[in-house]
Amino acid sequence: MTPRSLALATSISVSLDEPRIAPLKGSPPMKNMILAVSAVSAVAASANAGFQGFVASVRDVGAYTVIDIFAGVSNQSDKFLNAYDMSISTTVAGGFYQAAGLANKTWRPDTAGFVSTRDSIDSFMTAGTYSGGAQAGVFYASTNTNGDPTFINGNGGTSWNGTLLSAAATTVPQNAGWYTGDPTSIDNAAESLAGMVGRVNGTTGAGVPSSWGIWISHIVLAGNGRTLGTDVSYAGFASIKDGLSGAVSQGASTFPVPAPGAVALLGLAGFASRRRRA
């Protein structure tokens, strides 16, 4: 499937025949785009009716920090199309945690065995939630999740599709992306973000935190109390099809370095979530 070329960071709504969307050749490098996220957000506020920035749930689970990231959207009926030109890294020793086994040691979710869930101690990407919600209380990764060529071919070609001898994919290829194979699928249904545990809001062109979101990443790190913006860098672009107008919007988002007070609050949120599970 050939990516549809559109200018980055303008968030101009357009109609597309295909869900794959990518920047025009000659667009500014990703590192420059991330520095300009705030300016982009201000310009895009009126046009970016769908994508409202990344939203994360950060919590401690046993000896690990688990981070679920959502594409924040403006309407419950909005659909996730793709994430692209992503810059995702960690300073934690050993990188992102990957579970053992051929089906688990890459960023491709194990949807064949229905192993990749929000409870998994394993890192993967997803294009929504299987069947649009919890199944018997469990949220599974979407079976429509596909890696783009940068993800598939990056880091020696084993980040998305591993081999018996390949090492665990503990890093993400620069400018990697992933997309849904079926934009009309119920897997793309937005869910309410109300009451999210350990919520962290990414930068947003809408100017207000999103009330709805579509699950797109599940990241696991060894150790407790890991934070977005310090231990983990997560930035890039997403394309959303507006459920009301049918238009497609693009936008950039990142998680800035948290203020000291915010880090303390995140620690308390993680402690509270551990108490509730006890």
Image (cartoon, rainbow, N blue to C red):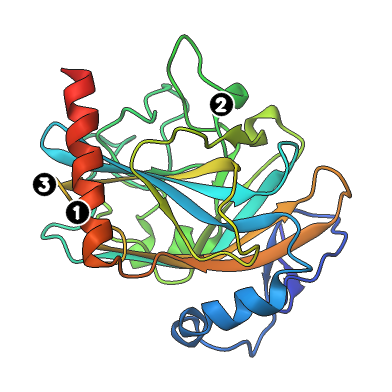
Query: Which callout, 1 or 3, points to the residue nearer the camera?
Result: 1
Q: Secondary structure at mark 3?
A: loop
Whole-percent x, y for residue 139 in the image: 46, 24
Note whether 13 is above or below 218 in the view shown: below
Q: Amino acid at mark 1?
A: Ala
Does any portion of residue 8 appear in the rendered image? no
Give the residue pinned by disc 2.
130
Give the Cα separation between the discs numbered 1 and 3. Answer: 16 Å
- Is disc 2 placed on a helix, strand or loop? helix
Residue 202 visible in this rendered orientation of the protein: yes
> Is residue 224 left or right of 163 when viewed as pictured?
left
Question: What quarter of the picture does the N terminus occupy?
Answer: bottom right
Does residue 2 lie above or below 59 as drawn?
below
Asked whether the beta carbons under mark 1 and mark 3 sit within 8 Å of each other, the answer is no
Under mark 3, the amino acid is Gly
Label 1's element? helix
Q: Dot 3: within a 10 Å radius of its alpha carbon, few (fewer than 14), some, or many (20 or more) residues?
A: some
Residue position marked by numbered label 1 in the rendering:
264
| Of callouts 3 and 2, the N-terminal one | 2
Residue at 19% x, 54% y: name it. 264
Location of the C terminus by quadrant is top left
In the drawing, does residue 42 fall left or right of residue 86?
A: right
Task: Say whether marks 1 and 2 touch (CB < 8 Å).
Answer: no
Neighbourhood count class around disc 1 (C-alpha, 10 Å): few under 14, some 14–19, many 20 upward: few
| Residue 133: image location, x then y, percent | 56, 23
Residue wearing tag 3:
223
Apparent side of residue 236 relative to residue 200 in the rendered image (left or right): right
Quarter-of-image position of residue 224: top left
The amino acid type, in three-letter code, at marker 2 is Tyr
